[in-house]
Image (cartoon, rainbow, N blue to C red):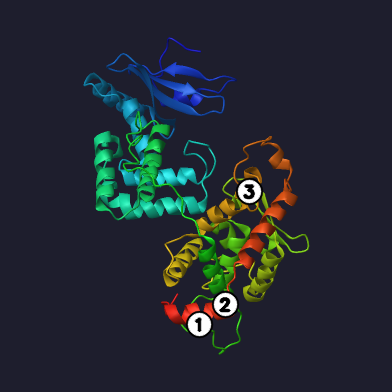
């Protein structure tokens, strides 16, 4: 709806009434300036103009009566002068909004990315990233990226800049290839968010995040190493009375940590799953530990059958947990769970003390899987994959959503076999004492 007569006074604007659909009124004496009246009653001054490239633009100036007719004329005249000089006010405003949302520097972009990722608005799978994932990304950013690139304008970063950064990271020699790739992955995720937000055309980090070939994860604990590790954990897991001396005066590992590692070994679970285990997830009567989907890597409920030995470990853990909701509460704060990184550090110290090659909690999963699929037990790789909570490789993946006990008997038999295997490896008490006296191990 339009009219040949233009608006000349504020009283004319005040007299305009809303209708079922929006309509416009031109403002007299101001080229391209009009007033749009919406069905809600809102009245907005808008400037229409043609940019240098020929694109037709529409620039809202403000709502009446907050913006008077005289003020709207002044703003329109100023913008028209800018357009004649080659500016594009509408485009400049859009860019300013983008800058306000994602910032100009890489550090500002990173903060915007993490805020969006927490809600699943960062692109990709459109699912919120877990808190521990975001914490790990922030840690890698702060340690390796922020100082070198944080203050750079991300729109100015080129592939050559990323290549130099990744090469220098590799030449420092402080990080393993996998860790370097993790740093590159964080950088690529942040810049990918800029692409998702239409701030840059392409991700300059693509194909440059792995300057070194990744090493195959082949570390295994053989039976000799498992026997030594389990024997040490067994002794450290003994709950002693106050003032009672432990058998090994050099050991510092507490019973709670030892029980957590024993439980991790017997269930072949991930360190984050064990560290965050809650009593509400455990059913000792049914002999199961049900990990909710939000705590599993596969994002599916995972039911872990408990062997009799694993169940006994949980009973010991109950005596130490007190009123905590967590099976393995943090020694610093019972309302929080054990730090997953503490499990990694404990295994590292344990391997050093026992003069074993460096290992990690994840190596127990690999060792158990290799043992169970070997000739001695011959358990199908598919069943072992179910034990490890890997993504389904055969059968309908949708079934897993409804069947919480899928392959439970087979998984129970596999973990029972693994528990028996670990226990059968135990050296005699005399042998353990002999090793302890001869090795004179360093404190844990």
Residue 15 place in picture, x, y as percent: 50, 24
Q: Is residue 158 visible?
A: no
Quadrant where the image shows the C terminus: bottom left
Q: Quadrant of residue 26?
A: top left
- Which label sits on residue 121? none
Is residue 134 something that shows in the picture? yes
Q: Earlier in the sequence, mark 1 or mark 2?
A: 2
Q: Residue at x 57, y 19 (%)?
A: 21
Could you give the CA–CA distance between mark 3 and mark 2, rounded to whole angstroms?
A: 29 Å
**Neighbours of disc 1 within 10 Å: few (<14), some (14-19), many (20+):** some
> Could you say which quadrant of the image residue 318 lies in?
bottom right
- From the image, tell me which residue sits under label 3: 384
Question: Residue 248's mark?
Answer: 1
Asked which secondary structure carries label 2, the reply is: helix
Residue 234 point in image, percent of width and height: 58, 74
Q: Position of residue 173 (x, y in %)?
A: 27, 53
| Residue lying at 56% horizontally and 72% vertically, measured from the top left | 231
Name, please, the residue furthest toward the right: 285
**Other residues around mark 3 within 10 Å, as few (<14) / some (14–19) / many (≥20):** many
Q: CA distance from mark 1 to mark 2?
A: 8 Å
N-term mark: 3 or 1: 1
- Residue at disc 3, secondary structure: helix
Q: Which mark is residue 235?
A: 2
């Amino acid at each position: 709806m339009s009219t040949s007569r233009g608006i000349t006074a504020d009283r004319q604007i005040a007299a305009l009434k809303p209708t079922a659909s929006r309509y416009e009124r031109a403002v007299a004496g101001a080229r391209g300036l009009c007033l749009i009246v919406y069905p809600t009653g809102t009245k907005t001054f808008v400037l229409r103009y043609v940019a240098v490239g020929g694109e037709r633009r529409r620039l809202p100036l403000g709502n009446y009566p907050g913006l008077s007719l005289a003020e709207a004329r002044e703003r329109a005249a100023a913008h028209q002068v800018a357009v004649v000089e080659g500016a594009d006010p509408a485009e400049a405003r859009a860019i300013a909004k983008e800058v306000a949302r994602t910032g100009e520097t890489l550090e500002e972009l990173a903060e915007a990315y993490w805020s969006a990722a927490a809600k699943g608005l960062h692109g990709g799978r459109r699912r919120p990233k877990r808190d521990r994932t975001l914490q790990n990304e922030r840690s890698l950013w702060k340690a390796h990226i922020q100082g070198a690139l944080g203050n750079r304008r991300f729109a100015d970063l080129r592939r050559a800049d990323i290549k130099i950064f990744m090469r220098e990271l590799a030449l420092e020699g402080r990080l393993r290839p996998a860790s370097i790739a993790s740093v590159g992955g964080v950088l690529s995720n942040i810049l990918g968010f800029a692409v998702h937000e239409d701030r840059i055309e392409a991700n300059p980090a693509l194909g440059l995040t792995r300057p070194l070939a990744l090493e195959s994860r082949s570390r295994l604990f053989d039976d000799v190493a498992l026997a030594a590790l389990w024997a040490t954990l067994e002794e450290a897991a003994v709950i002693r009375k106050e003032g009672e001396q432990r058998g090994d005066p050099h050991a510092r590992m507490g019973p709670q940590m030892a029980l957590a590692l024993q439980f991790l070994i017997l269930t072949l679970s991930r360190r984050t799953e064990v560290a965050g285990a809650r009593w509400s997830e455990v059913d000792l009567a049914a002999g199961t530990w049900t990990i909710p989907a939000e705590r599993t890597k596969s994002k599916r409920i995972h039911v872990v059958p408990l062997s009799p030995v694993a169940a006994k470990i949980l009973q010991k853990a109950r005596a130490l947990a007190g009123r905590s909701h967590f099976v393995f509460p943090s020694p610093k704060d019972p309302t929080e769970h054990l730090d997953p990184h503490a499990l990694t550090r404990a295994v590292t110290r344990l391997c050093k003390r026992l003069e074993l090659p460096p290992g990690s909690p994840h190596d127990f999963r690999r060792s158990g899987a290799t043992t169970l699929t070997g000739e001695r037990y011959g358990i199908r790789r598919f069943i072992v994959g179910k034990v490890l909570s890997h993504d389904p490789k055969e059968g309908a993946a949708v079934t897993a959503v409804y069947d919480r006990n899928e392959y439970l008997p087979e998984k129970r038999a596999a973990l029972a076999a693994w528990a028996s295997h670990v226990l059968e490896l135990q050296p005699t008490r005399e042998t353990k004492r002999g090793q302890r006296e001869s090795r004179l191990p360093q404190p844990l």
